[in-house]
């Protein structure tokens, strides 16, 4: 094979890619910002060239393909630059950290006719390949449910949480084995070590075929476990990547005696598997796709499908966090009154915090949750599952449908619009297709703007009047137009735009707040 490849990122997982591509005879360049890692490079033969700046590789016409193993938060920026430079790209999971960025990378790769492959390594595992064949051949019968445990006490990340770090493996396998995407996905999670970084999650997936799936991941577990179970009407399969016999089939059945079900157990049967290292199979597949210009098994679109599930699970955890906070506040302030104009309708039970004011002709539906010191203007509708934080201001003629979540300090201008279905028809009921919308802390939604459902508006973002939001909005982004485009960055105080210098720093001249721009993400300095 004549393809020569550059590996960007020589850290925890990048060293494995360097080893395998070297064994395949394809490694030519290695890039890492830590110059001391040069000493760890393979020394066989002439050895690969080393650089500390991956942009040095982008202008080199000899570099046809790159493998990206940088931190997950940088995947979008690094992959985008590589695709724009005309390189074929293999990127470790996840493809990006939100659906909009993932979609942008997929579209960019297709426009540039570039190979984009995502490192979902288990799709190249002999046990997963064999299990998929058994399912397609009907050996397991009709699939009832799947579950997976990916548990360990080991490398604990502080950038992406456990959902984004561990769960992509098992979600990709579940979608691959079933050949369908879930119609619903939600998750519960807890942060024990680093505030805001979830350490343990349980995700629940529901498929149109009736199959349900559970994915349990944790990096705070006393022992390592990597197990995937598929239960069918004829057989049950267990893929245990820690066991010597990695794939077992069980012919358990249920008999009925006197109308009472009784489990009849059977001994496990080991399935013979080919001997192959999954990572080497994956890397070889990428090189073959680059050579033949064929679509990878785990191409960008497959990575995007997994990303959509992760995104849905993440939104679910964020909604639950707000709801829990509201319930706690409501319990503590149960005896504190709020103001509702006599013309307003407030259906009980619902949760409304102290100091909140609800004005003329507004309707708060049963089950709605509204925080403290929130102002709800005239002719506003708040649906049963809508969640509104503290200090929110909602101007006249706004409807918050099921699934809309407003965090603390959000401003909704007059007659701005939320939606809950992408393709509504009066004749067709689509309540099971509602998509959630999350507006994060301090964001401003201008008068007559529209936020299309299924998207997130970031912290302190500013959406101009009349704009139509059709994608996720980053923190502090200034958006305008139809569809909304980012035209700059704005301070938390919204008094002026942010102008970043060459180091990525900016200071608001009005309030003095300092910001840092890194990989197209703004945060407080």
Image (cartoon, rainbow, N blue to C red):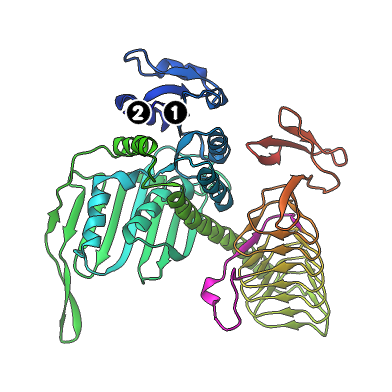
**Mark number for residue 274?**
none
Q: Does 487 appear above or below 143?
A: above
Left or right: residue 47 compared with residue 370: left
Front one among 164 and 83: 83
Q: Which mark is residue 21?
A: 2
Q: Is 71 a magenta residue?
A: no
Q: Is residue 5 above or below residue 326?
A: above
Mark 2 neighbour density, 10 Å: few (under 14) some (14–19) many (20 or more): many
Q: Position of residue 182 (x, y in %)?
A: 43, 64
The quarter of the picture where the C terminus appears is: top right
Residue 238 in view, yes or no: no
Pointer 1 residue: 7
Magenta span: predominant SS is loop
Sequence-wise, the earlier of marks 2 and 1 is 1
In this view, the residue in front, 510 or 285, is 285
Q: Secondary structure at mark 1?
A: strand
Label 2: which secondary element: helix
Outermost bottom residue: 258
């Amino acid at each position: 094979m004549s393809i020569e490849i550059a590996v960007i990122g020589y850290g925890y997982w990048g060293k494995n890619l360097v080893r395998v591509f070297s064994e395949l005879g394809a490694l030519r360049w290695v890039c890492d910002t830590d110059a001391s890692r040069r000493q760890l490079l393979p020394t066989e033969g002439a050895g690969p060239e080393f650089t500390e700046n991956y942009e040095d590789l982008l202008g080199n016409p000899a570099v046809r393909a790159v493998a990206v193993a940088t931190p997950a938060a940088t995947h979008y920026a690094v992959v985008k630059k590589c695709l724009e430079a005309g390189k074929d790209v293999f990127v470790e999971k996840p493809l990006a950290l939100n659906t909009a960025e993932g979609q942008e990378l997929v579209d960019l790769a297709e426009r540039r006719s570039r190979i984009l492959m995502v490192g979902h390594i288990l799709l190249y595992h002999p046990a997963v390949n064999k299990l998929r064949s058994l399912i397609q051949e009907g050996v397991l019968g009709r699939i009832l449910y799947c579950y997976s445990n990916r548990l360990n006490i080991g490398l604990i990340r502080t950038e992406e949480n456990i959902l984004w770090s561990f769960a992509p493996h098992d979600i990709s396998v579940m979608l691959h084995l079933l050949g369908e995407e879930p119609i619903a996905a939600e998750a519960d999670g807890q942060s024990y070590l680093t505030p805001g970084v979830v350490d343990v999650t349980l995700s629940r997936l529901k498929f149109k075929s009736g199959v349900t799936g559970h994915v349990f991941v944790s990096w705070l577990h006393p022992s390592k476990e990597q197990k995937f179970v598929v239960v069918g009407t004829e057989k049950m399969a267990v893929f245990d990547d820690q066991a010597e016999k990695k794939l077992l089939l069980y012919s358990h059945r249920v008999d009925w005696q006197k109308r009472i079900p009784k489990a009849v157990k059977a001994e496990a049967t080991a399935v013979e598997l080919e001997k192959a290292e999954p990572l080497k199979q994956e890397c070889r597949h990428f090189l073959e796709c680059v050579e033949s210009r064929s679509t990878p098994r785990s191409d960008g679109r497959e990575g995007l499908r997994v990303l959509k599930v992760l995104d849905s699970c993440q939104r679910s955890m964020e909604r639950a966090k707000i709801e829990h906070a509201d319930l706690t506040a409501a319990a503590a302030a149960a005896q504190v009154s709020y103001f509702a104009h006599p013309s307003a309708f407030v259906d009980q039970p619902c949760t409304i915090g102290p100091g909140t004011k609800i004005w003329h002709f507004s309707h708060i539906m049963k089950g709605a949750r509204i925080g403290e010191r929130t102002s709800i203007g005239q002719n506003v509708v708040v649906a049963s599952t809508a969640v509104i934080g503290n200090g929110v201001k909602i101007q006249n003629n706004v409807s918050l449908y099921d699934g809309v979540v407003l965090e603390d300090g959000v401003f909704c201008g007059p007659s701005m619009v939320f939606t809950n279905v992408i393709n509504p028809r009066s004749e067709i009921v689509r309540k099971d297709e509602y998509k959630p919308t999350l507006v994060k802390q301090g964001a401003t939604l201008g008068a007559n703007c529209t936020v299309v459902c299924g998207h997130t508006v970031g912290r302190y973002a500013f959406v101009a009047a009349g704009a139509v939001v059709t994608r996720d909005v980053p923190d502090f982004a200034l958006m305008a137009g139809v569809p909304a485009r980012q035209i700059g960055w704005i301070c938390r105080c919204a008094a002026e735009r942010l102008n970043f210098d060459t180091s990525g720093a900016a200071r608001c001249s009005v309030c003095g707040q300092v910001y840092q721009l890194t990989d197209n993400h703004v945060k407080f300095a």
